[in-house]
Amino acid sequence: MAGPEPTRGPLTPEELQLATRNRGMPLEALRYDLTPTGLHYLLVHFDIPALDTAAWRLRVGGNVERELSLSLDEIRARPRQTLAVTLECAGNGRARLLPRPISQPWVNEAVGTAEWTGTPLAGVLAEAGLKSDTLEIVFTGADHGIEKGYEHDYARSLTVADATRPEVLLAYEMNRRTLEPQHGFPLRLLVPGWYGMTHVKWLTRIEAVREPFDGYQQRIAYWYKRDADDPGEPVMRIRPRALMIPPGFPDFLTRQRTVERGHVEVIGRAWSGLASISQVEFGVDGAWTAAALEKPAGPFAWCRWSASWDATPGEHILSCRATDAAGNRQPTEQPWNYQGMGNNLTQTVHVLVR
Ligand SMILES: Nc1nc2c(c(=O)[nH]1)N[C@H]1C(S)=C(S)[C@@H](COP(=O)(O)O)O[C@H]1N2
Ligand SMILES: [Mo]
């Protein structure tokens, strides 16, 4: 079953329903190196499942030498690692596309950075013993629902090479506290550098398979496509993006900013899952200057940037754009794709200086 086609019309009741369930990070929270958990963005496709840790087990099976069934205590007793990781939803920026693909209508705010603690997945897979003809590892969550007519448990796969990278974690803490129900309690996958859909929450099953996984969230959702019939390219790592804290103060309804004239220090964050950030530019009415960049909290965390602006009275359009060390730079013209994936068009903020 196909979903609704992209639209030029106003927001639909279905999009509003999704928007009130899935919160974004208010852009002023870009001030924090680590996003307070309650300000981190959230995306839940179906319902937050009710999981009882006494009964919960992580089952590891499929094409392995030894099946495992691990309790949360057994996972917590394994080697422990903490990483600062920026997560971003692949649909971030979707509502800025015209026509607008109908799904969670993010503007720019589907991002956050937290310290995640867990055990490296590679160790668990080594203990299970992947058979040599294993192609992919499939990760399945406890949540269940229907999307575009397909009923399924939320599940995604990774190749063996991607799954066994040392930074891939089975995470049980976020910002040094037990995972909250909405962020995947008791255990989630963490794949630093990859868009959000990869980080399967409420993990219950890990399966080694010999064929490419064809579950809904892998085969149908999360593709860069020109139209419904385009086979497209899979969505994987996070494209570069810079965001700024909108300066001044907002109008409640329109969010239009008012700024006092004179020196303004504009600050923001920039990240890319493809390579480290090499440059951030700050734009005023289309003229770009280099922003100052700080070191990130780790290789998978956003970095802080700042730019000085001498604000002169009148209306101005501020923007920022990131470039990474692999040469990927944010577009200033609208890119478009059918599912509204990976839209890293530069942010623009309209301000009135008085
Ligand atoms: N089991 C499960 N895992 C999931 C999801 C989900 O709906 N179910 N949503 C994914 C998507 S699309 C995103 S963007 C991230 C969001 O993670 P967060 O809510 O902790 O920020 O979780 C991913 N993991
Ligand atoms: Mo997402």
Image (cartoon, rainbow, N blue to C red):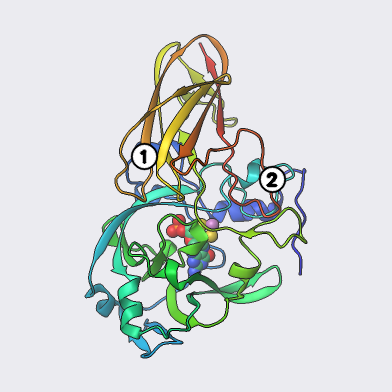
- Residue 144 is situated, as x and y percent measured from the top left of the image, at 56, 75
Q: Residue 67, position in %: x, y?
A: 38, 89
Picture quadrant of residue 145 = bottom right
Question: What residue is rendered at 34% in x and 63% in y?
Answer: 179
Q: Find residue 91 and report its horizontal and vertical position in percent.
A: 58, 52
Residue occupying the point 44% across, 66% down: 162
Label 2 secondary element: loop
Q: Relative to 159, is 283 above or below?
A: above
Q: Residue at x 40, y 18 (%)?
A: 264
Q: Amino acid at mark 2?
A: Trp
Name the one closer to the observer, 160 or 312.
160
Residue that carries the numbered disc 2 in the rendered image? 336
Q: At which x and y percent is residue 188?
A: 40, 68
Decide: is 43 above or below 333. below
Residue at (34% x, 72% y) in the render = 122
Residue 71 visible to the viewer: yes
Q: Which element type, helix, strand or loop, lies under badge 1? A: strand
Above or below residue 76? Residue 83 is above
Amino acid under label 1?
A: Cys
Q: Which quarter of the rendered image does ligand 2 occupy?
A: bottom right
291 vs 100, nearest the viewer: 291
Q: Name the residue furthest bottom.
A: 66
